[in-house]
Amino acid sequence: MPVLIEEQKNSRQWTKSVTTGLSVTRVWIVHAKQDEALSYIDTQEGIRLGTTYTGFNTLTIKELSTAFYTHNTSLVTASYTNKGEAGSQTSQTGPRLNDKIATYNSEMESSQEYTDRNGKMLNPVGQPVTVARPRLTARITHYRATFPLGDFMALVGRVNDRSWNGGNAGTWLYTGFSGSKYNEDMYQLDHTFSFAPEGHQKTTYFMQATTTTANNGKQFTCQKAYPFKNPQEIVSELYQTGNLALLGV
């Protein structure tokens, strides 16, 4: 029958580190084979995984192992590690709740423009000019406890109605989002944006045929662009605005 002989008092080793916090190792000698010793110390002595160390309730057994000692005795080793002692430091790999990671990518984008940024016509005959302008795209990954789908959907396709993320109103366009459960505590949410320093809001123009007489007396017709004078006529062509701060990123 297995019998607990003694604990090796001088075998207790205390350590404290930034990775595991406070920990201690204890070793017992049991008169039994290795498999019997592990079962005995669990059922008869109450030394099992999760057992706390007397006087240190933050220390629990995270590992039990046995080893050969003599032909009829075995060593049982219990490793107690910290489960959250105040003041201890533990390392954690991967993202944590409320972490935010931003990734930016810049590129040039070509567009057909009729006027410069000051509203002056670029082409005297009213034809559009291809202009290359800088664009900055951003992806912000946010780890949070909730996934407010309705709030995100209400803002997709809108530009910021006030200064946000270092840009003036109208310069950041919320282009989309995706989300999934990362672990039992949080969701991983990815938001994408497009930044236009001159602003995403564009003035819409209508084309009108104009007949012009040249110096040689010949007439020719060209298309000339005119901006709408009534803002109500172009409101449907503009991006709607929203408070992007409500995204929480």
Image (cartoon, rainbow, N blue to C red):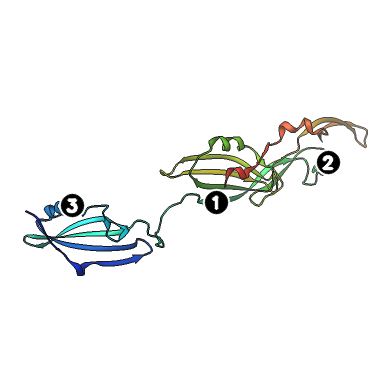
Is 238 situated above or below 106? above
Report crowding for label 1: few under 14, some 14 to 19, many 20 or more residues within 10 A (C-alpha): few
> What amino acid is found at the position of numbered circle 2 in the picture?
Pro
- The x, y position of residue 247, in whole percent, is 58, 43
Q: Which residue is mark 1?
A: 102
- The x, y position of residue 37, in whole percent, is 13, 55
Q: Nearer the viewer, residue 171 or 88?
A: 88
In the rendered structure, the answer to whether residue 58 lies left or right of residue 158 reads left
Q: Which residue is mark 2?
A: 124
* Label 3 – label 1 distance at C-alpha: 50 Å
Q: Secondary structure at mark 2?
A: loop
In the rendered structure, the answer to whether residue 203 lies left or right of residue 220 reads left
Q: Which residue is mark 3?
A: 42
Q: Nearer the viewer, residue 196 or 35?
A: 35
> What amino acid is found at the position of numbered circle 1 in the picture?
Ala
Is 245 situated above or below 4? above
Q: Quadrant of residue 122?
A: top right
